[in-house]
Image: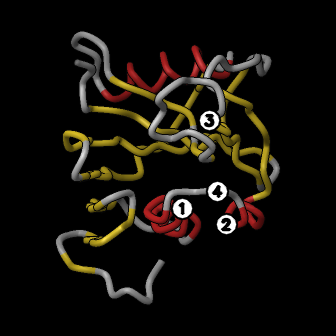
Amino acid sequence: MKSQLTTLCYIEENDSYLMLHRTVKANDENHDKWIGVGGHFEGNESPEECLLREVKEETGLTLNDWSFRGIVTFVSDDHPAEYMHLFTSSNFTGKLCPCDEGDLEWVKKSEISSLNLWEGDKIFLRLLAEGAPFFSLKLVYKDGVLVSKILDGKELPDLIQ
């Protein structure tokens, strides 16, 4: 079984994020969703080592600098808990290459909310857009529906997405 420790990175350029439209993998819990790039830790990797490896594997890009923005805990009734290390970066080199998990596309930040996103992703994307300091966000899903959201130990009201 793969580690439930993961990384996710939103790579920024020209007021856009590099987004991955997950369309390829069979039995993919993220099928047809738009997400950042990243994946599961391997061996004894640190969050930063996983970040650099996953970004290189999925995009062909090499991150030169990055910011560790938060920890997102995903709880679901049909999967083990996942602890995602959330990063952003705007300092990278290399040439974008095709991804074997779906289609990579630069999407204007102002248009991200119109994509097919997980409800919880909208919350941490808003926190990133607002420049929130390092945060801990817990998202609880039941039957694929977001039923609880806790930011830095405090329940968020339903009005906040």
| Screen quadrant of the N terminus | top left
Q: Nearer the viewer, mark 4 or mark 1?
A: 4
In the rendered image, the vertical position of residue 43 relative to residue 55, given as above or below: above
Amino acid at the residue labelled 1: Leu
Please, what is the three-letter code of the amino acid marked with disc 4? Answer: Asn
How far is the residue under mark 4 from the one under mark 1?
A: 13 Å
Give the residue type that dot 3 points to: Arg
In the picture as drawn, the residue positioned furthest to the top comes out as 43
Check if mark 2's residue and mark 1's residue have beta carbons within 8 Å: yes
Marks 4 and 2, how far apart in space?
8 Å
- The residue tagged with tag 1: helix, strand or loop? helix
Distance (Cα) linking label 2 and label 1: 9 Å
Disc sitting over residue 86 in the figure = none
Earlier-in-chain disc, 2 versus 1: 2
- Label 4 secondary element: loop
Cα–Cα span, label 4 and label 3: 10 Å
52 to the left or right of 98: left
Q: Nearer the viewer, mark 3 or mark 1?
A: 3
The residue at 59%/26% (across/down) is: 63
Cα–Cα span, label 3 and label 2: 16 Å
Give 134 or 72, whichever is nearer the viewer: 72
Q: Is residue 124 above or below residue 29?
A: below
Q: Which residue is mark 2?
A: 113
Q: Nearer the viewer, mark 3 or mark 2?
A: 3
Instruction: Write down the residue under mark 3.
Output: 22
Answer with the quarter of the image where residue 148 lies: bottom left
Q: Looking at the rendered structure, which numbered label has been put on residue 116? A: 4
| Among numbered discs 4 and 3, the one appearing first in the sequence | 3
